[in-house]
Amino acid sequence: MAYENLIYEKRDGIGLVTINRPPANSWSLAAMEDFEKIIDEMENDPDIRVVIITGTGEKCFSAGMDVADATKNPGLGNKGRELWRRVDRFEKPTISVINGHALGGGLELALACHFRIMTDSPKAKIGLTELNLGIIPGWGGTQRLHRIVGKAKALDMILFSKRLDAGEALAIGLVNQVSASETLMQDALKFAEQLSKRPPIAVRCVLKAISTGIYESLDNGLAMESEGSKTVAGSEDAIEGFTAFFEKREPVFKGK
Protein backbone atom coordinates (compact mmCIF):
# COMPACT_ATOMS: atom_id res chain seq x y z
CA MET A 1 0.00 0.00 0.00
CA ALA A 2 1.29 3.44 -0.94
CA TYR A 3 1.17 6.30 1.57
CA GLU A 4 1.18 10.02 0.85
CA ASN A 5 3.43 11.16 3.69
CA LEU A 6 5.58 8.15 4.46
CA ILE A 7 7.36 5.41 2.54
CA TYR A 8 7.02 1.85 3.84
CA GLU A 9 9.26 -0.97 2.64
CA LYS A 10 9.89 -4.54 3.76
CA ARG A 11 13.44 -5.86 3.54
CA ASP A 12 14.10 -9.41 4.74
CA GLY A 13 12.24 -9.18 8.01
CA ILE A 14 12.88 -5.46 8.48
CA GLY A 15 10.12 -2.84 8.24
CA LEU A 16 11.63 0.41 6.94
CA VAL A 17 9.55 3.54 7.54
CA THR A 18 10.75 6.80 5.95
CA ILE A 19 9.15 10.12 6.86
CA ASN A 20 8.63 11.70 3.45
CA ARG A 21 7.76 15.35 4.03
CA PRO A 22 10.96 17.20 3.08
CA PRO A 23 12.71 19.36 3.93
CA ALA A 24 11.69 19.27 7.62
CA ASN A 25 9.85 15.90 7.67
CA SER A 26 7.39 17.43 10.11
CA TRP A 27 4.33 15.60 11.37
CA SER A 28 0.89 16.62 10.11
CA LEU A 29 -2.33 14.87 11.06
CA ALA A 30 -2.35 13.09 7.69
CA ALA A 31 1.21 11.86 8.29
CA MET A 32 0.16 10.62 11.74
CA GLU A 33 -2.74 8.72 10.22
CA ASP A 34 -0.42 7.10 7.68
CA PHE A 35 1.98 6.17 10.47
CA GLU A 36 -0.82 4.61 12.51
CA LYS A 37 -1.76 2.36 9.59
CA ILE A 38 1.85 1.32 9.10
CA ILE A 39 2.24 0.54 12.81
CA ASP A 40 -0.89 -1.62 12.64
CA GLU A 41 0.49 -3.45 9.60
CA MET A 42 3.92 -4.07 11.14
CA GLU A 43 2.42 -5.15 14.43
CA ASN A 44 0.35 -7.86 12.74
CA ASP A 45 2.94 -8.99 10.20
CA PRO A 46 4.82 -12.06 11.54
CA ASP A 47 7.49 -11.58 8.88
CA ILE A 48 8.55 -8.23 10.36
CA ARG A 49 11.03 -8.73 13.19
CA VAL A 50 12.69 -5.29 13.40
CA VAL A 51 11.56 -1.75 12.54
CA ILE A 52 13.69 1.14 11.25
CA ILE A 53 12.37 4.72 11.23
CA THR A 54 14.24 7.43 9.33
CA GLY A 55 13.66 10.59 7.30
CA THR A 56 13.97 11.61 3.67
CA GLY A 57 17.10 13.52 2.67
CA GLU A 58 20.07 14.61 4.76
CA LYS A 59 18.71 17.77 6.41
CA CYS A 60 16.16 16.39 8.89
CA PHE A 61 15.17 13.18 10.55
CA SER A 62 12.17 15.18 11.74
CA ALA A 63 11.67 18.70 13.04
CA GLY A 64 8.59 17.60 14.96
CA MET A 65 5.06 18.92 14.76
CA ASP A 66 3.81 20.69 11.63
CA VAL A 67 2.79 23.87 13.43
CA ALA A 68 0.65 25.16 10.56
CA ASP A 69 -1.28 21.90 10.41
CA ALA A 70 -1.67 21.82 14.21
CA THR A 71 -3.60 25.11 14.12
CA LYS A 72 -6.16 23.41 11.87
CA ASN A 73 -6.15 20.11 13.77
CA PRO A 74 -6.07 20.69 17.54
CA GLY A 75 -6.08 16.93 18.16
CA LEU A 76 -2.64 16.56 16.58
CA GLY A 77 -0.85 16.81 19.92
CA ASN A 78 -2.81 13.99 21.49
CA LYS A 79 -2.34 11.87 18.36
CA GLY A 80 1.43 12.27 18.54
CA ARG A 81 1.50 11.37 22.23
CA GLU A 82 -0.58 8.26 21.58
CA LEU A 83 1.48 7.05 18.59
CA TRP A 84 4.87 7.69 20.20
CA ARG A 85 3.61 5.67 23.18
CA ARG A 86 2.79 2.81 20.82
CA VAL A 87 6.33 2.98 19.42
CA ASP A 88 7.75 2.97 22.96
CA ARG A 89 5.72 -0.14 23.84
CA PHE A 90 6.15 -1.86 20.48
CA GLU A 91 6.90 -5.55 20.91
CA LYS A 92 9.44 -5.66 18.08
CA PRO A 93 12.76 -3.77 18.27
CA THR A 94 12.64 -0.26 16.82
CA ILE A 95 15.63 1.73 15.56
CA SER A 96 15.57 5.43 14.75
CA VAL A 97 18.13 6.29 12.10
CA ILE A 98 18.75 9.98 12.67
CA ASN A 99 19.87 11.24 9.27
CA GLY A 100 19.77 14.96 10.14
CA HIS A 101 18.17 17.30 12.67
CA ALA A 102 15.89 15.64 15.24
CA LEU A 103 14.14 18.44 17.09
CA GLY A 104 11.09 18.67 19.33
CA GLY A 105 8.63 15.94 18.43
CA GLY A 106 11.19 14.45 16.05
CA LEU A 107 13.60 13.74 18.90
CA GLU A 108 10.66 12.57 21.01
CA LEU A 109 9.95 9.93 18.36
CA ALA A 110 13.61 8.86 18.41
CA LEU A 111 13.47 8.68 22.22
CA ALA A 112 10.50 6.31 21.95
CA CYS A 113 12.55 3.90 19.82
CA HIS A 114 14.63 1.18 21.45
CA PHE A 115 17.83 2.20 19.64
CA ARG A 116 19.16 5.41 18.06
CA ILE A 117 21.84 5.62 15.35
CA MET A 118 22.88 9.12 14.27
CA THR A 119 24.79 10.58 11.34
CA ASP A 120 28.13 12.20 12.17
CA SER A 121 27.32 15.20 9.95
CA PRO A 122 28.40 18.39 11.76
CA LYS A 123 25.17 20.04 10.58
CA ALA A 124 22.92 17.51 12.34
CA LYS A 125 21.68 18.56 15.78
CA ILE A 126 19.22 16.99 18.20
CA GLY A 127 17.30 18.59 21.04
CA LEU A 128 14.00 19.33 22.71
CA THR A 129 13.70 22.98 21.80
CA GLU A 130 10.04 23.63 22.62
CA LEU A 131 10.74 26.13 25.41
CA ASN A 132 12.09 28.57 22.80
CA LEU A 133 8.44 28.88 21.72
CA GLY A 134 7.12 29.14 25.27
CA ILE A 135 5.74 25.59 25.22
CA ILE A 136 7.00 22.27 26.60
CA PRO A 137 7.78 18.88 25.06
CA GLY A 138 4.37 17.26 24.68
CA TRP A 139 5.02 13.89 23.02
CA GLY A 140 6.79 12.19 25.90
CA GLY A 141 10.04 14.13 26.03
CA THR A 142 9.73 15.13 29.69
CA GLN A 143 9.39 11.46 30.62
CA ARG A 144 11.70 9.60 28.25
CA LEU A 145 14.74 11.88 28.02
CA HIS A 146 15.63 11.73 31.71
CA ARG A 147 15.31 7.95 31.70
CA ILE A 148 18.04 7.83 29.08
CA VAL A 149 20.45 10.62 30.09
CA GLY A 150 19.53 11.31 33.72
CA LYS A 151 17.48 14.05 35.36
CA ALA A 152 20.12 16.81 35.53
CA LYS A 153 21.20 16.47 31.90
CA ALA A 154 17.59 16.23 30.71
CA LEU A 155 16.67 19.41 32.55
CA ASP A 156 19.73 21.17 31.15
CA MET A 157 18.77 20.16 27.62
CA ILE A 158 15.07 21.00 27.93
CA LEU A 159 15.18 24.20 30.00
CA PHE A 160 17.91 25.75 27.83
CA SER A 161 16.66 24.23 24.54
CA LYS A 162 20.14 22.86 23.86
CA ARG A 163 21.01 21.25 20.55
CA LEU A 164 23.65 18.51 20.62
CA ASP A 165 25.79 17.20 17.82
CA ALA A 166 26.41 13.49 17.31
CA GLY A 167 29.54 13.35 19.45
CA GLU A 168 27.85 15.09 22.37
CA ALA A 169 24.78 12.86 22.06
CA LEU A 170 26.93 9.72 22.03
CA ALA A 171 28.94 10.87 25.06
CA ILE A 172 25.82 11.08 27.26
CA GLY A 173 24.21 7.91 25.91
CA LEU A 174 21.45 9.71 24.03
CA VAL A 175 22.36 7.80 20.87
CA ASN A 176 23.74 4.26 20.75
CA GLN A 177 25.93 4.66 17.69
CA VAL A 178 27.30 7.33 15.34
CA SER A 179 27.90 6.50 11.68
CA ALA A 180 29.35 8.35 8.72
CA SER A 181 26.57 9.87 6.64
CA GLU A 182 27.50 7.80 3.59
CA THR A 183 27.24 4.50 5.51
CA LEU A 184 24.44 5.43 7.94
CA MET A 185 21.69 3.30 6.42
CA GLN A 186 24.05 0.46 5.62
CA ASP A 187 25.17 0.36 9.26
CA ALA A 188 21.58 0.55 10.47
CA LEU A 189 20.47 -2.30 8.22
CA LYS A 190 23.38 -4.43 9.41
CA PHE A 191 22.40 -3.79 13.03
CA ALA A 192 18.75 -4.55 12.24
CA GLU A 193 19.74 -7.75 10.47
CA GLN A 194 21.62 -8.90 13.57
CA LEU A 195 18.57 -8.12 15.71
CA SER A 196 16.29 -9.98 13.30
CA LYS A 197 18.25 -13.18 13.92
CA ARG A 198 17.51 -13.11 17.64
CA PRO A 199 14.64 -15.34 18.91
CA PRO A 200 11.45 -13.35 18.16
CA ILE A 201 9.36 -14.76 21.00
CA ALA A 202 12.08 -14.12 23.57
CA VAL A 203 12.68 -10.62 22.19
CA ARG A 204 8.98 -9.83 22.45
CA CYS A 205 8.84 -11.10 26.03
CA VAL A 206 11.84 -8.99 27.05
CA LEU A 207 10.36 -5.83 25.52
CA LYS A 208 6.99 -6.48 27.18
CA ALA A 209 8.58 -7.05 30.59
CA ILE A 210 10.69 -3.90 30.39
CA SER A 211 7.86 -1.64 29.20
CA THR A 212 5.48 -3.07 31.81
CA GLY A 213 7.98 -2.26 34.54
CA ILE A 214 8.37 1.30 33.22
CA TYR A 215 4.69 2.05 32.58
CA GLU A 216 3.16 0.14 35.47
CA SER A 217 5.37 -0.99 38.35
CA LEU A 218 8.36 -3.12 39.30
CA ASP A 219 6.07 -5.86 40.62
CA ASN A 220 4.05 -5.92 37.39
CA GLY A 221 7.27 -5.98 35.39
CA LEU A 222 8.52 -8.96 37.39
CA ALA A 223 5.20 -10.72 36.86
CA MET A 224 5.48 -10.12 33.12
CA GLU A 225 9.04 -11.45 33.22
CA SER A 226 7.79 -14.61 34.94
CA GLU A 227 5.06 -15.01 32.35
CA GLY A 228 7.60 -14.54 29.56
CA SER A 229 9.88 -17.17 31.06
CA LYS A 230 7.05 -19.69 30.92
CA THR A 231 6.20 -18.70 27.35
CA VAL A 232 9.72 -19.15 25.99
CA ALA A 233 10.32 -22.38 27.92
CA GLY A 234 7.79 -24.20 25.77
CA SER A 235 8.85 -22.70 22.45
CA GLU A 236 10.51 -24.41 19.51
CA ASP A 237 13.05 -21.59 19.56
CA ALA A 238 14.20 -22.64 23.03
CA ILE A 239 14.70 -26.20 21.82
CA GLU A 240 16.63 -24.88 18.82
CA GLY A 241 18.75 -22.63 21.05
CA PHE A 242 19.83 -25.46 23.35
CA THR A 243 20.30 -27.87 20.45
CA ALA A 244 22.51 -25.39 18.59
CA PHE A 245 24.52 -24.79 21.76
CA PHE A 246 25.34 -28.47 22.21
CA GLU A 247 25.98 -28.91 18.48
CA LYS A 248 28.31 -25.87 18.51
CA ARG A 249 26.51 -24.04 15.69
CA GLU A 250 24.55 -20.83 15.20
CA PRO A 251 20.84 -21.21 16.06
CA VAL A 252 18.17 -20.50 13.49
CA PHE A 253 15.16 -19.05 15.28
CA LYS A 254 11.77 -19.19 13.57
CA GLY A 255 9.55 -17.47 16.10
CA LYS A 256 7.68 -20.62 17.08
Image (cartoon, helix red, strand yellow):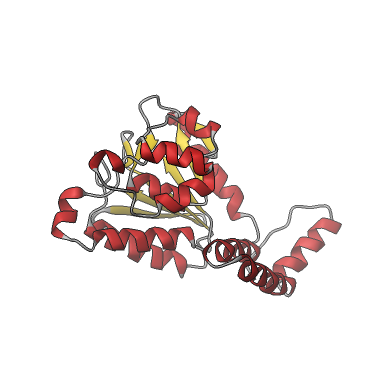
Q: Residue furthest top?
A: 122
For the residue pair 100 and 78, the one nearer the viewer reads as 78
Q: Position of residue 151 (x, y in %)?
A: 51, 44
Q: Residue furthest left?
A: 72
Residue at (28, 63) in percent of width and height: 33
Question: From the viewer's perspective, is 114 left or right of 42?
Answer: right
- Quadrant assignment for the C terminus: bottom right
- Quadrant assignment for the N terminus: bottom left
Question: From the viewer's perspective, is 234 left or right of 68?
Answer: right
Residue at (55, 38) in percent of width and height: 173
For the residue pair 143 and 54, the one nearer the viewer reads as 143
Q: Where is residue 97 in the image (x, y as percent from the top left)?
A: 44, 42
Q: Report if residue 2 is visible in the image.
A: no
Q: Where is residue 163 in the image (x, y as percent from the top left)?
A: 37, 32
Instruction: Check the image and report above or below for 248 versus 227.
Output: above
Tell me where residue 207 sits by quadrant: bottom right
Instruction: Check the image and report above or below for 143 versus 124.
Output: below
Question: From the viewer's perspective, is 167 left or right of 65?
Answer: right
| Callout count | 0
Residue at (27, 58) in percent of width and height: 77
Q: Where is residue 64 in the image (x, y as percent from the top left)?
A: 30, 47
Q: Report if residue 21 is visible in the image.
A: yes
Q: Which residue lies furthest to the right in this view?
A: 246
For the residue pair 47 and 203, the one nearer the viewer reads as 203
